[in-house]
Image: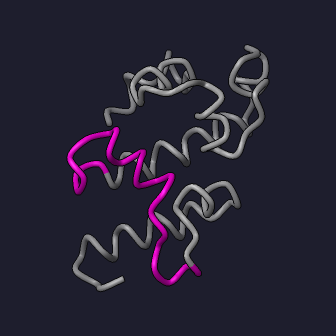
Amino acid sequence: MELAKYADGDLFVPRKIAAALHTTRMEIAYAAGLTGPAVQREECIRSDRTQRRLGEMIAVVNKVEPYLGSALMAFAWYKSEPLSGFSGFTAMQLVRNGRSDEVLAYINAVGAGVHA
């Protein structure tokens, strides 16, 4: 996933992310741990919290995409695949709970050949 095509200037744009992942802005909001207004109202989209959460979600999806072959497959993995070592939580559940750094470290470890 090329990050620049999901942004206008220096802001992530929920509409562009949703279009690329063939989903809705509401699904993007849920996947990032945000509310509906956070991805619909301009002032909320620009907030630091919204931008940070969208960035965390995109970073995880972007990191796993090369292993899975497409952004769509990466997003499906993000939402539904339980991660070993995390009590069966998915990447989405962990990111929604502020644990994106742990998910990225997990992906790096698996990519380096460490068995999960």
Whether the magenta-drawn stretch holds residue 41 is answered as no
Q: Residue at x 73, y 39 (%)?
A: 34
Q: Residue at x 49, y 66 (%)?
A: 103
Per the picture, the main secondary structure of the magenta-coloured stretch is helix
Q: Residue furthest front?
A: 80
- Colour mode? one colour
Q: Looking at the picture, how far across and down is residue 100, in whole percent?
A: 56, 60
Query: Where, quadrant-wise, is the N terminus in this rendering?
Result: top left
Whether the magenta-drawn stretch holds residue 85 is answered as yes
* Image mark count: 0
Q: Residue at x 20, y 46 (%)?
A: 69
Instruction: Report the side of 28 relative to 45 (left or right).
Output: left
In the image, residue 18 above or below residue 90: above
Query: Where, quadrant-wise, is the C terminus in this rendering?
Result: bottom left
Q: Looking at the picture, how far across and down is residue 27, in whole percent?
A: 60, 34
In the image, residue 112 above or below residue 107: below
Q: Looking at the picture, how far across and down is residue 10, in whole percent?
A: 53, 24
Q: Looking at the picture, how far across and down is residue 58, in whole percent?
A: 47, 42
Q: Residue at x 60, y 25 (%)?
A: 25
Report the span colored magenta. Answer: 65-87
12, 39: nearer the viewer: 39
